[in-house]
Image (tube, grey):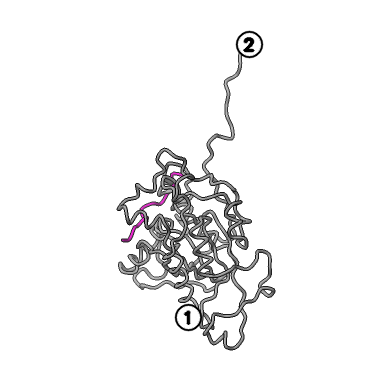
Amino acid sequence: MATSFLSLKKSSSSGALNAMEGDGFEYSLGPPDSGFSIFLADRTKKIHFIRHAEGYHNVATKETGSNDCLLRGDEPASAHHLYDSRLTAKGIAQAEALRAHLATRPSGARSFTAFDLVVVSPLTRTCETALHVFGQPREPGKPAFLDQVDAPKNSPEYAAGVKVPPPRFLVREECRERWGHYVCDGRRSISEIAKEFPNFDFSEMVHDQDVFYSDERESDEHCCDRAVRFLQWLNSRPEKCIAVVTHSSFLRHLFGQFGETLKKDDRDDLQRLAGNCELRSVVLCSHGVKDGQKVDPLMPPSANPSTVRMETLKF
């Protein structure tokens, strides 16, 4: 089922969706009735969005027929057995199947799809999915020419002895699942997760503990807001072929803001709910008006104002 957030033009959380107004995102390019858009090639990059593979929380909701099994009850959310849920054996098999598909999916001049960068949500199930789909990442800080591995087996490149660098795995909070309310969408501390995924690059994470999770669900407006900010961050990256391992609700809030000028079948295909370990590839085009703008790290709402006015004390 497709979900549209095209009517959301402003965010009540920060107002950042105002950034979409006037930058051309809400309009088609080219003659109004041409049915085409033309973009400068150097302003585009291919983004391969991947929803995480099946997790135990997915199985639990299917078996019970509702999301009530994901509520914390009287215990802390972190004590729930589905908190920051992991992949099932079926989920691991799904990820390995996608890896095999990418190994035979032509891209560029190669017989397989290779990525310059893999961006990963910090939740455990996305880290696991990335590891099973792409294998061990390149060590943070290590140049590509010092870390070369064999091309996928059975490929012409493998037979020719071609070596390729594994991609970096960069963990970003912005592409995590819509947080709050459901225990599966909280995360463990980064200090704990990093021990399990030692070659993932966590250097751009700001908070060790999960400062975003609460009993209240993140608003649609705020999730849409950070999804667009995430696109702005992706656009600032030098890499041209990027994979993003993320979540269904985050993708729903991202893609639901686009596609207004597409034909219905394409719009529905873009905005529909992603299946477990589904790959959805898009071309991200910058209109140039946001290039070079700084993208601030994702921060939780401030609980206290930075300035407090006190009444004058009278003696």
The residue to which callout 2 is attached is 315
Please state the horizontal and vertical placement of residue 132, each as a whole percent of the image: 51, 68
State the image coordinates of residue 223 (x, y, percent, origin top left): 44, 51
* Secondary structure category for the residue under label 1: loop
Specify the segment rendered in magenta.
Answer: 1-13
Q: Quadrant of residue 145?
A: bottom right
Out of 250 and 95, give the one closest to the viewer. Answer: 95
Residue at horizontal 46 percent and vertical 54 percent from the top: 85
Sequence-first tag of 2 and 1: 1
Residue positioned 54% across, 75% down in the render:
114
Q: Which residue is mark 1?
A: 104
Q: Nearer the viewer, residue 141 or 13?
A: 141
Q: Residue 79 in the image: x percent, y percent?
A: 48, 44
Give the amino acid at mark 1. Answer: Thr
Within the image, what quadrant is residue 295 found in? bottom right
Q: Residue furthest top?
A: 315
Quarter of the image with the N terminus is: bottom left
Q: Amino acid at mark 2?
A: Phe
Q: Depth check: 4 or 193 in front?
A: 193
Q: Is residue 75 above or below residue 252?
A: above
- Please say if the residues under marks 2 and 1 sit with CB atoms less than 8 Å apart: no
Name the residue: 37% across, 65% down: 270
Assign the C terminus to one quadrant of the image.
Answer: top right
Q: Is residue 62 magenta?
A: no
Tell me residue 52's x, y (percent).
45, 62
Determine crowd level at label 1: few under 14, some 14-19, many 20+ residues with C-alpha closer than 10 A.
some
Left or right for 264, reference 175 = left
